[in-house]
Amino acid sequence: MTSQALERARTWMRENQLPSDASIAEMRAWMGPSPAIPDTTIAPVQVTGPGASGGGPDETPAEWVLAPGVDAARRILYLHGGGYCMGSPATHRNLTSRLSAATGMAVLSLDYRLAPEHPCPAAVRDSVPAFAWMTRNGPAGPGDAAAAFIAGDSAGGGLALGTLVKNRDLDDRQADAAVLLSAWTDLTLSGESWETRAEEDLLVNRAATEQLVDWILPGPLRPNFPLVSPVFADLQDLPPLYLIAGDHEVLRDDTTRIAALGRMMGLTVREEIYAEMPHVFPAFPSLPESIEVMAMIGEFLRAQVPARWPERG
């Protein structure tokens, strides 16, 4: 039985659909800010270090999102969704503040560069050094992370997975685990759910997504470039993955295919496909399924904290 909260969410999605030919300005205006939950601390910060923003000692803006009583030595790099072309830490504050509360951890929400002004691979050139910075710096300043995780939704989920792949290739400190919400992992748009879930998905359509791909990859890189389409990447030796998606979204198979590939390569994979749920349903705080899955994310990440690091009082 469909809940009243889901019906309200569907009504909102129907009434707020973007036209398939929306301009980048219209897309960005549509994706407005969302408020953090009460008593959350938002602390702006500049992520610095070699390679930040793609070279040299540049800086990438970010913000610490801190629920009351978090263990600041346990940290999550959060990469927002928005098709690599829209979104910001401000658009995702409700989600990141709920993530901090559910996990008891500090969340670093990164304002990575967006296409079309900064096409691929700009985003991953920001996310990789940002993760490294987070392992050495917390909300109070320099200090090693007791546990370091990465999470993201939609394009941010794909970017999180690409960041794991790049960390492995660089032999940098790796995340202890990752949480991917409705991750966009295939810019070739070849998953069967693009056809089988097209009528049910009220948020994502092919025409608008094809335009995003053109903005993200205007040059020699192809849509199967592994760092933005990690369904084509070598996933060996990656940390545990928690993959979450809705059954009523065209990106459903971007999750199921990554789960299958990960298991085939021997990874620890937890996969949840929620019946009737829309794209990035955890971002709808009134949905019972959203409340449930946030609690499950908290349990999953706390279970992945390295045993050598006890919880701090």
Image (cartoon, grey):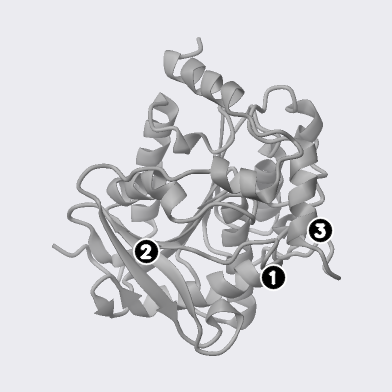
Which residue is pictured at 62% across the width and 62% down the height?
Answer: 114
Q: How many marks?
A: 3
Q: Is residue 165 visible?
A: no
Q: Earlier in the sequence, mark 2 or mark 3?
A: 2
Q: Earlier in the sequence, mark 1 or mark 2?
A: 2
Q: Residues within 10 Å of mark 2 (few under 14, many from 20)?
A: many
The disc labelled 3 sits on which kind of residue? Pro
Which numbered disc covers residue 292? none
Per the model, the C-alpha gap separating discs 1 and 3 is 12 Å
Q: Secondary structure at mark 2?
A: strand
Kindly indicate whether the residue at mark 3 contacts the one at mark 1 (C-beta within 8 angstroms). no
Q: Earlier in the sequence, mark 1 or mark 3?
A: 1
Q: Residues within 10 Å of mark 1 (few under 14, many from 20)?
A: some
For mark 2, what is the residue? 63
Kindly indicate whether the residue at mark 3 contacts the one at mark 2 (C-beta within 8 angstroms). no
Question: Which residue occupies the extreme left position in the image?
Answer: 313
Q: Is residue 144 above or below residue 213?
A: below
The disc labelled 1 sits on which kind of residue? Pro
Which residue is pictured at 74% across the width and 63% down the height?
Answer: 233
For mark 3, what is the residue? 223
For this view, does 232 lie left or right of residue 283?
right
Q: Position of residue 10 (x, y in %)?
A: 55, 21
Q: Secondary structure at mark 3?
A: loop
For this view, does 167 lie left or right of residue 235?
left
Q: Quadrant of the C terminus?
A: bottom left
Q: Position of residue 244 (x, y in %)?
A: 54, 41
Which numbered disc covers residue 121? 1
Quadrant of residue 35 in the image?
Answer: top left
Q: Nearer the viewer, residue 250 or 103?
A: 250
